[in-house]
Image (cartoon, rainbow, N blue to C red):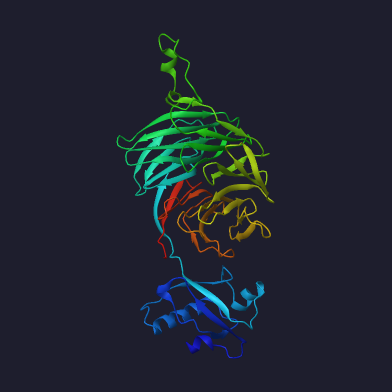
Amino acid sequence: MSSIINKDKDVAQMQIRFITKQEKYTVPNYPLSVPTTIVGSDLNALVNELLKESDLITQEIEFDFLISSEFLRTPLIEHIGERGISTEQVVEIEYVERHPPPEPQDCFIHDDWVSAVAVSHNWILTGCYDNTVHIWTTKGKHNLVIPGHTSPIKAVAWITVNDKNASFVSASQDQTAIIWDWNITSNSVDCVHICKGHERGLEAVGVNETGVLMATGSWDTMLKIWSTTAGDDEDENDHDNNDEDGKIAAKRSKRDHGKIRIPKRTMKGHKEALSGVVWTDKHEIVTSSWDHTLRIWDSELGGIKQEIPGSKSFFDVDYSHLSRALITASADRHIRLFDPRSNEGSIVKATFSSHTQWVQSVRWSTTDEYLFLSGAYDNNVKLWDSRSPKASLFDLLGHEDKVLACNWSNPKLMVSGGADNTVRIFKTKSSK
């Protein structure tokens, strides 16, 4: 241990104290004197020596180190200097087991760009630029290819999933969203509602936590709310009853067998296309837009609760029910973390800068309040910890063209789709 602490006797020393919330890795919390230039790898070696001395471990454990709620990514003196911490005081350094690297799994090949992905349990839904929707198992079996739309699919979302049946929605540049029922037992799909009302192509769709409402965002700048349930009185029934010989009915395409559904509510406010839609609770929706703003809406009252300005176009937004924070993807290559409820300083709490081109998609972990994914036009998917804004934890390599969508709804699987016509899957293991 002395070789780590005193590796350069000419460098100024300071005192630190190790703390952790992971009790199985607790080391004595007495102050230690270390060089001010010490870096994370040295601290890792130091903690591992202390653990071995206490007979707590038999093999090396990789740790990350937190000072003032941010991971150490620079020499200690630089990190504390940026935060106004004196070298005269004992600095508490929290250590946490490092998140293990995600492992590459399957690659699903499509016939065109994969612009939308959604995961529920063991099922993966994908939307493609050849106007089709696909259902896959997480093991790689291709269950169905679903025609029906007449333009590229830009967003998909699961509504309900159980052992025998599922429902989901696809949103397309053909100005419609279609709600589908999937009989898992017979592996057959029915179009049950065609949602019409937007005047330009759809970009985003989100389903609320109860599964009874969904919201769509479009290039027509409108946010529309729809019922997802059967028997809703917003349906417009088909009017072919007077067609005695049924010729018109016979000529209808498969997609027209469903009822036309009109929106329950249309909300105006954005000045350019909506790029992302996410529900934060039963009634509150957050949208991102090309008009450089985020907006928080009340779907019951139909009004805007808050407008959050940005400096560039937003391409996506996601909300964490664990941290109650928003992350956004932007044209300036940065990801930002917002706390809309913050009363202290800026509501932008962190900026994550590592992608080299447009960031197209962001998704929070559903089980860890700090972790999220991003996908960008630089062909990269990145795994981030919100406590490490200067560097991502891991780059999930494999895509050979722009990443257009990512999803982490299944905690064990990170899924992404891209302009290389593939869906790529990485398996993640919890470090806890």
Q: Kindly identify the residue that appears in the image at 50 percent across and 41 percent down.
A: 208
- The front one of 25 and 121 is 25
| Most distant residue in the top direction | 244
Left or right, 83 with respect to 418, comes to right
Q: Residue at x 44, y 77 (%)?
A: 26
Q: Residue at x 37, y 78 (%)?
A: 57
Depth order, front residue of 151/216:
216
Q: Position of residue 84 (x, y in %)?
A: 67, 74
Q: Is residue 358 visible?
A: no
Residue 207 picture location, percent across and down: 49, 40
Q: Is residue 4 above or below residue 206?
A: below
Q: Residue at x 50, y 52 (%)?
A: 400
Can you name the residue that lies furthest to the bottom here?
9
Seen from the viewer's position, the closer of residues 143 and 161 is 161
Q: Is residue 126 left or right of residue 312?
A: left
- Vertical relation: 131 (above or below) 91: above
Q: Is residue 68 above or below residue 54?
A: above
Residue 307 at x, y = what percent? 67, 46
Rendered location of residue 173, percent (x, y): 55, 34
Image-based side of 204 in relation to 259, left or right? right
Question: In which quarter of the view is residue 346 placed?
Answer: bottom right
Residue 189 appears in view: yes
Q: Is residue 239 above or below residue 270?
A: above
Q: How many marks?
A: 0
| Image quarter of the C terminus | bottom left
